[in-house]
Image: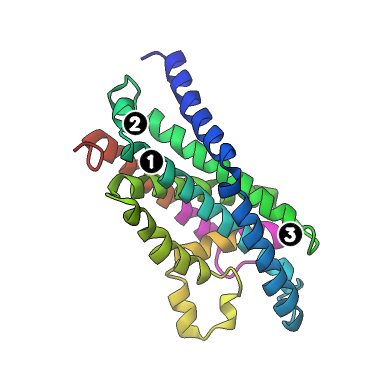
Amino acid sequence: MNSEKIWIAYKTIVRAEVVRFFRIWSQTFLPPAITTTLYYVIFGTFIGSQIDPIGDFTYMQFIVPGLVMMAVITSSFTNTVSSFFGAKFQRQLEELLVAPVPPVVVVAGYVTGGVIRGLLTGLLVLIIALFFTHITIFSWFAVGVFILLTSIMFSLLGLVTAIFAKNFDGVQIIPNFVLTPLTYLGGVFYSIHMLSPFWQGVSKLNPILYMVNGFRYGFLGMSDVHVGASLCMLVLMSIALVVYTMHLFRTGRGLRH
């Protein structure tokens, strides 16, 4: 398959993904916008007004990067897991697997769709934040790298989840029992320095803590963990997921029945 046909196949998958989530915008963009607004009002305005500044920043400014990252994680994961499992459930995936399209193109297409939705949702959440507080950017590079790698990683995780899911209940296991607890305990609403030494140690076992703090560093220039370690962990986890996803496509595990 020549490069032109590969590019056409990739664009076709990405276009289908983008058209799909824009067509159902009331389900893809409206819920995170409403939920985040409630977070800003309740945690940032009502509760935040009673909390002392964290470093040189108000509590509202502190939680904004975490809420943006939470929206990116959820949207990136949800897009790929719902779209890919839908194709699998409706038997559309079989046509894609027998087509002369390399697995890497299929993976790249679905992941790109998840990344686009994740970034657009994150941008929407950030724009909403402008109505509540002043936004500062300490490092554009850190902001870009962490949000891009995080959206790629969770798009891949959504793809893996969809591959193994046997029904719609299986699709909800990871977001309900893994992502939601880890995200809320990942330093979105608090600094781990507020915790006892024991719970600080426990918190450092949570990978989402490193993503949130790396992204927060890009905005505020402060982080509860080493930014270099956060970036290395994110890169290694993304590479591991790429390798594992490609392995699943090559072996057909979870894809062929």
**Label 3, label 1: how many angstroms apart (C-alpha)?**
33 Å
Between disc 3 and disc 1, the foreground one is 1
Q: Residue furthest left?
A: 257
Q: Residue at label 1?
A: 86
The residue to which callout 2 is attached is: 92
Q: Tell me where residue 144 appears, x and y as whole percent.
A: 63, 47
Evaluate whether residue 65 shows in this view.
no
> Mark 1 vs mark 2: which is more N-terminal?
1
> Residue 115: x, y in percent?
53, 42
Q: Is residue 43 left or right of residue 228?
A: right
In the picture of the structure, the residue carrying the numbered disc 3 is: 129
| Residue at 74 percent of width and 83 percent of height | 50
Start and end of the magenta stretch? 215-234
Q: Secondary structure at mark 3?
A: helix
N-terminal of the pair, mark 2 or mark 3, is 2
Q: Is residue 117 magenta?
A: no
- Secondary structure beneath disc 1? helix
